[in-house]
Amino acid sequence: MKTIGFLGPAGTFTEMATMSIFPELKRKEFATIPACMDGVSKGDVDAAVVPLENAIEGSVNLTLDYIIHKHQLPIVGEVVVPVEQHLLIHPRHIDDWKSVNTIYSHPHAIAQCHEFLRMALPDSELNYTNSTSAAAKFIMENPNLKAAAIGNELAAKTYNLSIIEKNIHDYENNRTRFVVLSRKQEDIITPHNIGHKTTLMVTLPSDYSGALHQVLSAFSWRKLNLSKIESRPMKTGLGNYFFVIDVEQKMDEILIPGVIAELEALGCGVRVLGSYPCFTITSRKEKEEAVKRPI
């Protein structure tokens, strides 16, 4: 049976993403994003799921930099997970949860729940952890503390905590994009498939006026839609950048190869980071609204 690595510990949004597309495969947690990728490269796991982008916080630069600079691991899949943060508490404190004086969670999760904390628990001390699930685990292991964690439903279930307040995040449409990395192209098929993408890394020729415009034109006249273009430093000196471009189409035999040939003719460097299926998980609110709609 194949083993899928994920950014742990148990109960993270990354594990939720992993379970959604690999529900029957064995999972192995890793402490860091680099460790996940190392696990794939060394053959300890067959593939790994790591976060790449958040709708509020932006790109996960560590993931992107390791894909570019450290490992030649193709992206073979993408899954978008709704970020629904809840206030988790030890069951023994359900009746007096408003007396909580300390909140534990990942810095991003605490930032995403700023308004709720300001209104409901304004005097609570904020303590940062490596992940939301690490915070949940800490609350489970320290039942005597008047403390709560911010985390997801999976973390609550994993560590036997009670969800005392649901959906305390400030932004309803927060999503995190995860990618599946493997040493070889994998066929991933699930009911959540919503399309395909091809991701390219493009480096521009030096001292070439209008080079980026010409790069974008190569996609434009072929009517290829770009869902994202992002610049990242090449780490070779100030002012040296490469571009990561997401094309909303599966690698074909004509259009995208034509783009690559045209860019290379302009003196650009092009590397295909992956051509892969995309999936999405429906949030609880979306499911509830779907049930209410008239048939």
Image (tube, grey):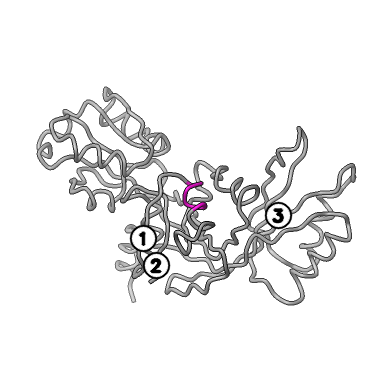
In screen coordinates, is 86 left or right of 43?
left
Name the secondary structure under disc 3. Answer: strand
Which residue type carries mark 2? Phe
Q: Which mark is residue 27?
A: 1
Name the residue: 61% across, 65% down. 197
Q: Where is mark 3, residue-wise?
A: 201
Q: Where is mark 2, residue-wise?
A: 22
Foreground pick, 78 / 163: 78
Name the residue: 55% across, 70% down. 195
Q: Is residue 137 shown in magenta?
A: no
From which residue to which does the magenta span run? 33-38
Foreground pick, 2 / 7: 2
- Disc 2 crowd rating (10 Å Cα; few below 14, some 14-19, many 20+) is some
Q: Is residue 82 above or below residue 262?
A: above
- Disc 3 crowd rating (10 Å Cα; few below 14, some 14-19, many 20+) is many
Which residue type carries mark 1? Arg
